[in-house]
Amino acid sequence: MRTQQTTSPARERLVRTLAALLLAVSLCLPSLSGCAGTESVANGGSAASSQQVSAGSATAKLSDIPEYSGALCIDVNEGQPGFSADDAARGSFMEFSELDFEGRCGTAAGLIGPETVSNAERGDISQVHPSGWVQHRYSFVDHEMLYNRSHLIAHQLCGEDANERNLITGTRTMNAVGMTYYEELVGNYVRRTNNHVLYRVTPLFAANDLVARGVQMEAESVEDGGQAIRFNVFVYNVEPGVKIDYVTGDNWESSEVPAVKTKGEATTTRGAGTDAALSQYAASKSEAGASGTSGDSSSSASTTEQQTYILNKRSHKFHRPECDSVQSMSPSNKEEFTGLRQTLIDEGYIPCRSCNP
């Protein structure tokens, strides 16, 4: 009788890890200089080989990150990003780290500007399965699916679709609530000013985890030296009511993970002068228009007039009533609001980038 030998998944993973390490060492021995460098990729492009992107001088350490307790986003380095003068002087770039031996993404960075932002619909990314992709459905999660294929640099900021070096396994809450808050700040600023923003996102993994514990997001507006956009935050990769095994990606329902109490508005980003800078820019464009030059093309409603908006209580976005997104919104997440636009912004809501309310 012939018996079949089986190998545990943990043993197989250990063997793969050791093999990858041995291969990496053998490749680097002939020339140590061959183990350094970065890959610059044009919008939508690719390269034959890549290395790791510099994470900057203010990189977060997981040992310094407190356990999640309801604050979805917290400041790192008192909110100050770690960009250097060389970063600001290098000009246009978009970089993605190559996957490591576990298939995990590294740091992604770029100079976000009018030449990189995209208003096009995102393409299909379903063929990409990031490390730790163990999908599960929960009725209490927005859109029911626990995990999103989360862009490190958002599609709206760089136009990237199915780039495996730009997609990680992220919870619905981290992706659609936490990261979106900061992505919208950058995207709206660039669209309304045509200025540029240094931007860097670093997924933080513990040991051999396949799912990141969260992402560090850094940004600094260039033309004004960071007066309008400046933040350095950590966004937890958590889903209220769901426990995640970050080593494997497995997950199960659990009351141990509390609801989100504060989102991006709890960080110092809120006081970074973004709204003031945009208002000042809009005012200067209006003055230019009055003198015969082209004015601000923004379709945003007057901040002094009461308007009716449709709120998505889950994503914390607000829309014009006629916005297409309103039609597909879950009734349980929908709420009508009549009042000042600034009131919603003060409460942490962000405007939809499609209807630009």
Image: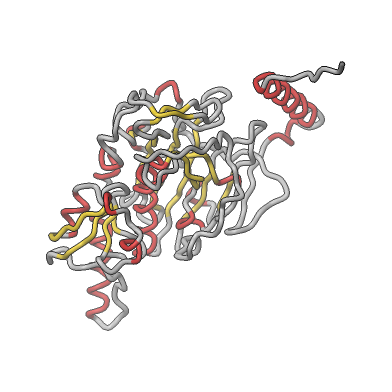
Residue 352 sits in quarter: bottom left
Number of numbered markers: 0
Give the percent coordinates (x, y) of residue 155: 49, 55
Which quarter of the rendered picture does the N terminus lie within? top right
Which quarter of the rendered picture does the C terminus lie within? bottom left
Residue at 48% x, 65% y is 120
Residue at 74% x, 20% y is 6
Q: Is residue 100 above or below residue 67?
A: below
Residue at 30% x, 42% y is 264
Give the percent coordinates (x, y) of residue 84: 47, 42
Q: Is 173 left or right of 130, judged from the image as shown?
A: left
Give the percent coordinates (x, y) of residue 270: 26, 45
Q: Is 336 left or right of 136, judged from the image as shown?
A: left
Q: Foreground residue, 90 or 116?
A: 116
Residue at 69% x, 51% y is 47
Q: Is 28 left or right of 238, judged from the image as shown?
A: right
